[in-house]
Image (cartoon, grey):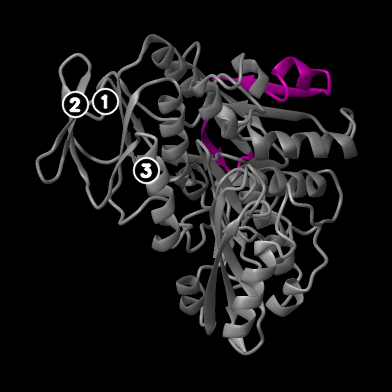
């Protein structure tokens, strides 16, 4: 197993359940200091919601050893030799290199953050938020605050980091080159509501602006933006998105797909005999378009790792694809999306329509009612549901799961508009906003 987080260790666990230690020796190499941990929980440790950090660890190397799985941390695979059936591994603690043979190889190298080529990127005080080590460092900084935090990038990680620092009393500025935040998953009219809610609680959002440089000598002191504005900064967090770590596979001669991630079939098999791949470094198939995609989500990493492990262990299971369903919150504002936006559907050759509905998360008269907006996308003529976006107060975002279920099962918007959903005033209106959005997009599609 090359990589010891979600995909790699899910694969290891599933393979072990099907093949005993006498039948299959399993060795995992992980370059960080942790295995089998929740990267999605890291911003919430930084914020202080989750303590101690070890609560984010599902299994330790010692726990895997009890399953007869060797998990080596601080070990990085530097080379794969398909002809010799070996991997070259560097022990990062001792600086020593060794060679390990394999019969079956599982590549779960994950993803890495985008880093802009600008001056000051290597200054102390500039951080990523991808591993537990990153979270540990940022938590120490937050605990020593408050101060000024500049978040570069308006994606999920960037906004979750912004919440973490804001929650701990820091002055937070989010800088993004895009026209809005979350612009890879939300349309501008939906993400605009996210910006409004962030600015209402004191988080400044600067859009359509690139970072020109990070200033400081021994430590970061400010961030220079195109246009000339200088933002004071005691810490800078990079949240510019991520890319698949596929160089190791490519150097070995394993095929990459059009997304730049490792190409796999529905059994997670790569182009090389006996080599599997799963997680952020591997492609998956979109359920609606049938096209290869590369999403960096913990749900997908765990599921594709499970499929790889079952097949490594002698089973026969196919991964059925993805919709890219994602969810997060920024303080009291919840955000979620699934499937395709209208522009994405049209780019894929689907004639699509959209409709937006605005209402409340509960019955309108309920004391805790908050505003919610849902946008739904459907195919013109058939009314087949293609995608949805949700932005609203507490209780809004998990409605995305209803849309994801409907899209997964090729339901029409009209069918969803009549689905027998639960109702009580503390949870929704008698017509949930799901019904209303589905009915509106069904009418637009007909």
Q: How far apart are marks 3 and 1 (CA)?
A: 16 Å
Residue carrying label 2: 222
Which label sits in the foreground, 3 or 1?
Answer: 3
Question: Hey, which residue is sitting farthest front in the picture?
Answer: 365
Element carrying mark 3: loop
- Residues tagged 2 and 1 counted as in contact (Cβ below 8 A): no
- Which of 265/438 is in front? 438
Q: Is residue 2 above or below residue 362?
A: above
Q: Which mark is residue 122?
A: 1
Going from the N terminus, do you reach mark 2 or mark 1 first?
Answer: 1
Question: Hey, which residue is sitting farthest left in the picture?
Answer: 228
Q: In this view, does 123 lie to the left or right of 76?
A: left
Local crowd at mark 2 within 10 Å, few (<14), some, or many (≥20)? many
Residue 374: x and y in percent read 57, 62
Going from the N terminus, do you reach mark 3 or mark 2 first?
Answer: 2
- Which of 132/24 is in front? 132
* Magenta-drawn stretch contains 396: no
Residue visible at 58% across and 86% down?
A: 380
Residue visible at 55% across and 39% down?
A: 109
Q: Can residue 231 be seen in this view?
A: yes
Residue carrying label 3: 240
Q: In this view, does 119 lie above or below 259?
A: above
Element carrying mark 2: strand
Which label sits in the foreground, 3 or 2?
Answer: 2
Q: Can residue 89 be seen in this view?
A: no
- Which of 51/291 is in front? 51
Q: Which segment did they paint magenta?
A: 57-85
Local crowd at mark 3 within 10 Å, few (<14), some, or many (≥20)? many
């Amino acid at each position: 197993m090359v990589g010891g987080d979600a995909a790699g260790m899910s694969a290891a666990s599933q393979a072990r359940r099907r093949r005993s230690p006498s039948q299959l020796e399993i060795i995992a190499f992980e370059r960080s200091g942790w295995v089998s941990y929740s990267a999605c929980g890291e911003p919430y440790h930084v914020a202080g919601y989750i303590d101690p950090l070890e609560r984010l660890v599902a299994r330790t190397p010692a726990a895997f050893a009890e399953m007869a799985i060797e998990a080596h941390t601080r070990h990085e695979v530097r080379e794969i030799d398909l002809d010799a059936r070996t991997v070259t591994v560097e022990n990062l603690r001792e600086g020593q290199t060794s060679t390990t043979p394999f019969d079956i190889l599982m590549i779960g190298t994950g993803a890495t953050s985008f880093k802009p080529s600008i001056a000051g990127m290597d200054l102390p005080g500039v951080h990523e938020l991808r591993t537990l080590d990153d979270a540990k460092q940022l938590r120490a900084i937050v605990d020593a605050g408050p101060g000024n935090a500049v978040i570069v990038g308006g994606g999920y990680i960037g906004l979750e980091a912004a919440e973490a620092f804001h929650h701990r009393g820091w002055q937070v500025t989010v800088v993004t080159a895009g026209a809005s935040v979350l612009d890879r998953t939300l349309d501008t009219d939906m993400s605009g509501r996210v910006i409004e809610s962030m600015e209402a609680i004191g988080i400044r959002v600067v859009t359509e602006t690139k970072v020109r440089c990070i200033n400081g000598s021994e430590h970061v002191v400010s961030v220079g933006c195109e246009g000339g504005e200088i933002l004071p900064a005691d810490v800078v967090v990079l949240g510019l998105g991520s890319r698949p770590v596929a160089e190791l596979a490519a150097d070995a001669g394993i095929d990459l797909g059009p997304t730049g991630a490792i190409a796999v079939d529905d059994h997670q098999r790569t182009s090389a005999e006996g080599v599997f791949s799963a997680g952020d470094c591997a492609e998956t198939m979109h359920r609606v378009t049938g096209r290869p995609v590369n999403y960096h989500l913990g749900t997908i990493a765990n599921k594709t790792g499970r499929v790889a492990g079952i097949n490594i262990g002698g089973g026969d299971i196919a991964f059925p694809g993805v919709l890219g369903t994602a969810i997060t919150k920024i303080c009291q504002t919840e955000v979620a999306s699934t499937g395709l936006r209208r522009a994405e559907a049209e780019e894929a050759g689907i004639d699509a329509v959209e409709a937006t509905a605005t209402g409340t998360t509960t019955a309108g008269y309920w004391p805790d009612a908050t505003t919610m907006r849902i946008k739904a996308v459907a195919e013109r003529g058939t009314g087949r549901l293609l995608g949805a976006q949700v932005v609203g107060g507490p209780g809004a975002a998990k409605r995305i799961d209803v849309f994801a279920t409907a899209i997964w099962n090729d339901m029409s918007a009209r069918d969803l508009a009549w689905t027998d959903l639960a109702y009580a005033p503390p949870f929704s209106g008698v017509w949930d906003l799901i019904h209303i959005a589905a009915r509106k997009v069904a009418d637009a599609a007909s």
